[in-house]
Each structure stands twice: as C-alpha cells, then as structure tokens.
Image (cartoon, grey):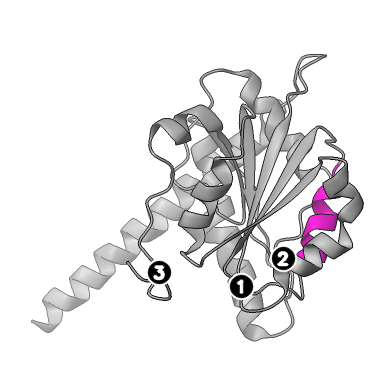
Amino acid sequence: MAKFIFYVFFIGDILMSARLIIVGLFAIIDRLRKPRGIASPGYNPRVAVLIPAYNEETVIVRTIRSVLNSTYKNLHIVVIDDGSLDRTAEIAREAYAAEIAAGRLQVLSRPNGGKAAALNYGLQEVNEEVYVGIDADTVIAADAIAKLIPHFEDPLIGAMAGNAKVGNRVNLWTRWQALEYITSQNFERRALDLFHVITVVPGAIGAWRTAPVKAAGGYPSIPSPKTPT
C-alpha cells in the first residue's frame, strides 16, 4: 500500500510538472506573437459598463471614477445597488449627479437578490452591442476597456477576459493571492489565448457581447435568503 501511494503521488507530480511546462510554453509563444486587439479606424461602439454593488459605500465612488477616467469614452455606466444596507446608491448619486444628468451614468436600486440577479437587472438597461462587467471594489486601469473592446470587431468573439490583479498586497496572504492570480489564472489564460479559447471570464473585469448573453437568459441566479420567495 505504501508503494502504491508513493507511485500515485510520484506520477501526479510528473503530470502536474508536465502540465506547467506545457502551459508555460504556450503562454510564452502567445506573449511573443504579434499584438492583437487593434481596431479598424472608426470602430468605436458605445459600451455599457455594469457594476453590481452590495454594501460598497466606502469604495463605490473610487470604482466609478476609475471607469469615468477610461481612455475609452463612449460609455454608458450602470451601477446596480443590490439592496445594500448602507448608503451605496445615495453616495453614488450624490458624487456623480452631473454624470447622471448627462446620461453617462445610471444608478439603479433593487431588493437584494445576489450578484447574478443584479447583473440581470442591469442587463435590462443595456442596448449596447458589448458590455463590460466589473466588481464594485475593482479599480480598472485607464486603458483597460480600450484594450478589451477592439477584439469585438471580430464577429466570432463572444467574450474577453480582463487581466485582474490583486491591489492590496499588504501581507503574506494577499501576496499569495496575487501569486495565485498570476499562475493559475492569468498565466493559464494567456496559454489558452493561443488557441482563441477561454474557460472563465472573471467577474472582476470581463467583456461580453450582449445579444448572446440575453439570448441565453442572462446569468443563472439563486434567490437570496434575504428576500422572500
């Protein structure tokens, strides 16, 4: 029995090491390829940005500001307050009253039902061909959306995964999480990109073609225990 267990772990180590090497090679090849994601002149579709939020009053202003600071300007931002117990919606409306008046920003409120239900609620307001979804505690780079959208000029592209990174690397646990993001998520996605496929589009930042998501019925959601069913 001891030998059997030893060989199981030994073979497992070999397979995991081989997988890591193969993924690494694919990622390097993809990294060295000619850069993609450069749209034709004039391709500048209006893009919706959905931000589901629950009890995010301390960060919602910063998150919205990061989207407004995007180099991609043709945006329709929709914040969905998912029954927050704090002042998330009120703070967003107070801080960005001018953007709301100009039609660049909407702040919706609904009874708590979970992130998927909030996204589905926000999708009802989306008429744009493409939308970007981010978490309410995500601060996006100024060029993040501008790098995601050009890929959708190809009609075969249905979704694009953003490159999420841990920002608060302040202790050992958060540093380990940052390493995990690099190795098990971004590293692997770059390898998969070599074959034009992706297994997971992160909720922290990702872009989707709107019509297929709506045709599929939106995001599957489970009723929140906070609301009666």
Residue that label 1 marks: 84
- Marking on residue 192: none
Q: Is residue 25 magenta?
A: no
The residue lying at 63 percent from left, 59 percent from top is: 135
164 or 10, nearer to the observer: 164
**Amino acid type, callout 2:** Ala
x and y, in percent, of residue 105 in the image: 78, 47
Mark 3 and mark 2: Cα distance apart in space: 19 Å
User: Which stretch is magenta?
Assistant: 60-70
11 or 72, nearer to the observer: 72
**Amino acid type, callout 3:** Ser
Residue lying farthest to the right in this orientation: 98
Residue that label 3 marks: 224
Residue that label 2 marks: 89
**Amino acid type, callout 1:** Ser
Q: Are marks 1 and 2 in contact (CB under 8 Å)?
A: yes
210 relative position to 1: left or right: right
Q: Residues within 10 Å of mark 1 (few under 14, many from 20)?
A: some
Going from N to C along the chain, the mark reached first, 1 or 2, is: 1
